[in-house]
Image: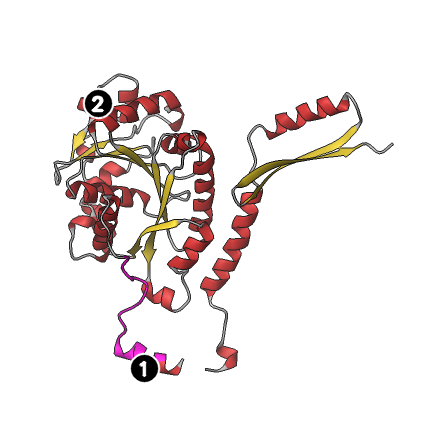
Amino acid sequence: MGIVIAVISGKGGVGKTTATANLGLGIAMNDEKVVLVDFDIGQRNLDMILGLENRVVYDMVQVMEKEANLKQALIKSKVSNNLSFLAASQTKDKTVLDSERVKDLLEELKAEFDYVILDAPAGIESGYEHTIEFADAAIIVVNPEVSSIRDADRAIGILDSKSQKVKDGQEVVKYLIINRIVASMVQSGEMLNSEDILEILNIKLLGKVPEDKGVIDASNQGKPIILNEKSVAGQAYQRIAKRICGQTVKMEDIESENKGLMTKIKGMFS
Amino acid sequence: MFPWTKKKKSASVAKDRLMIAIMSDRNNETYPFIDELKAEIIEVVKKYIGVKDIEIKKEREGDFEALSIDIQLEST
């Protein structure tokens, strides 16, 4: 029986969908069976990031409404046999989701996959609530930036009150990914560091992802950055995927710069 | 180096502002049914004593959550 992980953010545009795609692929590369489900109904995007947009025939709403069965709607990734994808509906709106249908769909997926990873819509509306309702764990993606952190706190608050696990008296596991860290800005005190963010949100860290220009290039091509072994963000997602699979991977220090001669000299005077 | 070049770093400003904003967000949490609840409580209390206003707040301290209900009575 697989576990359900919701990837959430509160605010949009922080790299939630990119994180979902990369972690899905990363976990699949660790020999686990993974399915990614795009819950952002009306704003389908995960298919583009994965490079699977041309292969979408049926979407998850059609599966829920029994217009298609799961087998017809699941799309196999080109790069990993272990990774499947279920697209969001682009024509319906978020109100089509209801608890019973979501629950049934997730049960069906859990029976077949080790990891069921849900890409939540941004915001804290009903679409979001349905994504987190039956999740065993949540991964919160933030940027080191005030609006993202504040909105993440709201999303975590709703997770804590609306999750079925919490209602049943259990705990929903929560972990944070800090995305788009710029080491030089952290060092100069212009960007919040990870310790401060963890303290503000009172949450455990899953991993830190550095800012990486390659991410846009990767999504242009529909090839998640984790496939590029030289990219710093790709390496960060590799480490995070391993942690999710239960391996112990050291928390890499990506907030200190490799100091060049000039910064060393400057450092002597400050 | 020079005291006048020492400016508070913006990251620490951000941290302070976030701490306060999030604290107040958490305290302002409310329920969608709060208005109905308010109206019903007013109806019940009104049977016995005059009510001027009522304020319901969700409070959280650590792991404990409470609903605090302040009822302001009509002055006699």
Residue visible at 31% across and 54% down? A208
Residue B21 shows in this picture: yes
Residue picked out by circle 1? A265
Q: Can you give x and y, in whole percent of width and height, for residue A210 in the image?
A: 29, 57
Q: Earlier in the sequence, mark 1 or mark 2?
A: 2
Q: Is residue A175 left or right of residue B10?
A: left
Q: Is residue A242 above or below residue B2?
A: above
The magenta-colored residue range is A251-267
Is any part of residue A98 visible from this angle? no
User: Which residue type does callout 2 highlight?
Assistant: Leu
User: In the figure, residue A101 lies in which quadrant?
Assistant: top left
- Residue at the right extreme of this rendering: B76
Identify the image quadrant of the N terminus of chain A: top left
* Nearer-the-camera pick, A84 or B65: B65
Give the amino acid at mark 1.
Answer: Ile
> Relative to residue A156, is residue B5 depicted above or below?
below
In percent of width and height, residue A144 lies at: 39, 55
- What chain does badge 1 belong to? A
The colour scheme used to paint the residues is secondary structure
Image coords of residue A77 (percent x, y) = 15, 36
* A169 w.r.t. A254: above or below: above
Proximity of marks 1 and 2: CB atoms separated by less than 8 Å: no
Q: Residues within 10 Å of mark 2 (few under 14, many from 20)?
A: some
**Residue at x 47%, y 40% (from the top left corner):** A157
Q: In the displayed structure, does residue A19 sit left or right of residue A142?
A: left
**Residue A258 is a magenta residue:** yes
Identify the residue under disc 2.
A70
Disc 2 is placed on an element classified as helix
Residue A64 percent location from the top left of the image: 30, 21
